Structure formats: C-alpha cells, structure tokens
Image: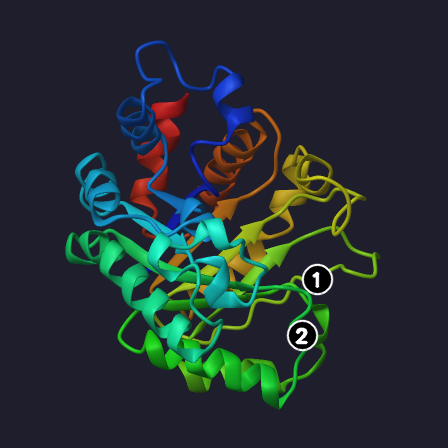
Amino acid sequence: MTRILVGTCGWTDPALLRSGWYPPGHRTPEGRLRHYATRFPAVEADSPYYALPTARTTQLWADRTPPGFRFDVKAFSLLTGHPTRPSALPADLRGHPRDEGLLTETWTRYAEALTPLRRSGRLGTLLFQYPPSLTPGPAAETFIRAARERARDWPFAVEFRNPAWWRTDRTTAFLRDLNATAVAVDTPQGLPTSLPPVTPVTTPHLSLIRFHGRSPHWGTGTKEDRFRHTYAPEELRAWLPRVRALAEATEEIHILFNNCCADAAPKAAQTMHHLLATLPHQRNHDAARASSAGT
C-alpha cells in the first residue's frame, strides 16, 4: 500500500511565525518543529538552499521528530546552477574558482551535513530544483547527470522551472535513466512561465508534488507576490485522480505546499488531508493522525 505524506515547504517562514499557527509555548526552534511534527508527517527543509547546513543542525531535526517523519531537503543553490553569493559559501571556499572542484567539495560538505537525517531514516529525498535558465539540451543533461553521479547513493528528485522540459517525452526517459524522481507541480496556467501539472512516475519508491499556489504573478515580483494563494477545496480535489494514479505505481507520495502567506500552506495541507481520506485502500495513517491532531 502506498504511504501518502502531506506537509508544507518549510516550517520557519516569518509570515507563518507571525500568523499565530504555532501556539504559545511552541515558538522556540525546538518547540516549533516538535509541534509541526504532531500535525504533519513530512516537511521540506529549504534553508540548505541558501547556506550549507551543519550536521549538528540536522541531528537536532532528527531528534525533534518521530520515527517515520520525512524531510525533503533542497539542494544548495550552487549545486543547481542558481546564482550564489560568495558569502553563502563556507569561508574557506569563497575564493575558489567556480569549477567542478568547487562543486565536488560543496557536495561533499552538503552530504556530510545531511548524514544524521539519512542515518535516522528521516531523509525523504534531496530536491534539486533547477532554474528557468536551465534549458533542455545536451549541456543541461550533462550538468544534471554530473550532480546525480555525485549523489549516486542518495534519493534524488528533480524539479524543473523551465516549462520546455515537459514539452518533450525525452525528459521522463532521462529522469528514469538517472533513477531520479520527477517533481510534479501545481502552478497557475496560461502564463509564459506556467508549468504543466504532469505527473510521470520515474522511480518506484517516491513521487513528489509541490503546490506553489496560483498567483497571477508567478515568475515575477517578490516571493510574496509569486506564491500568495489560498487554495480552494475544489482546486485540490482536482488533483485526487492524479494522486490515485501515482499511488498505483509508487511506494510513497509526498505532497508539499509552498503557497503563502501567513498560515495558507498548513491550511491547504490540512484540507488535502481530509480530501485524501476519500481515496480508497491507501495506507495514509500518518495523514489521518496529523489530521485528527489538527482538528
């Protein structure tokens, strides 16, 4: 039976902290994560995209969550070809040429930092989100394949932000060849940067869906402009047939909400919990536990 885990893309967003979603007595770093883990069984850790984490930090994440909890961890920006400020690098690497040697050393430190999550069984997947500037073609495939080779023993998921990747059947075959999970997304439709809601299964162990909201400012403006959206139940219900199809071919499904602001993401995740209860014959005990804790 497929295990379906629902959560949010992060648990420390300032707007979420200001929203009052965390009750009194649970507003320290430890209290927030422990409280979050009583509500949802999975979360995306996005802070490693901005700076390399430490093993001490990820050990604390493992210690503050129950067995079976999952962290999907975003790859550091340098590893995915995003612009990376020198100050985001460790001090001893800031003067290093931006070459294969730097990527290899950065990956080594990133992997070492995530070892506590992996060792504790709490690592869901690494999430390599590639920028819109990465257009499909041989050079891009070589770049991604090199990243996969460095992470060859790790779970590896890929999200493309350039819609051209999903205009060719080659992408699905490419990700299958890499044993990389294709990330499905929900975004607004009809814009030049809109991404289609395709849900190919490229690995048997995991499918991942990220709900980014349906803001008309997707791809432009501030983070709040791009991701501000309150999901209506009917918008989420439309995804149930896709989730059902994924469940027929995947051992575990992660559904994560990246819409903001305030507590829009946990509210949408809670709604999805209730809707998933209508899917027959799914092993969704974690979602049911979290749903009952949130009511």
Mark 1 neighbour density, 10 Å: few (under 14) some (14–19) many (20 or more)? many
Give the colour scheme of this rendering.
rainbow
Q: Is residue 238 above or below residue 28?
A: below
Q: Which residue is mark 1?
A: 195
Q: Is residue 102 above or below residue 19?
A: below
Q: Which residue is mark 2?
A: 166
SS assignment at label 2: helix
Give the x, y percent position of residue 86.
50, 55
Please report the residue visible at 35 percent of the width from the left and 74 percent of the height from the top. 104
Give the x, y percent position of residue 75.
43, 59
Question: Which of the 4 image quadrants contains residue 241?
Answer: bottom right
Q: Amino acid at mark 1?
A: Leu
Residue 64 as seen in the image, left or right of residue 132: left
Identify which residue, 106 or 14, lies in the foreground.
106
Q: Quadrant of the C terminus?
A: top left
Question: Which of the 4 image quadrants contains residue 1?
Answer: bottom left
Structural distance between the alpha carbons of marks 1 and 2: 8 Å
Q: Are marks 1 and 2 in contact (CB under 8 Å)?
A: yes
Q: Is residue 149 above or below residue 17?
A: below
Please report the residue visible at 36 percent of the width from the left and 65 percent of the height from the top. 106
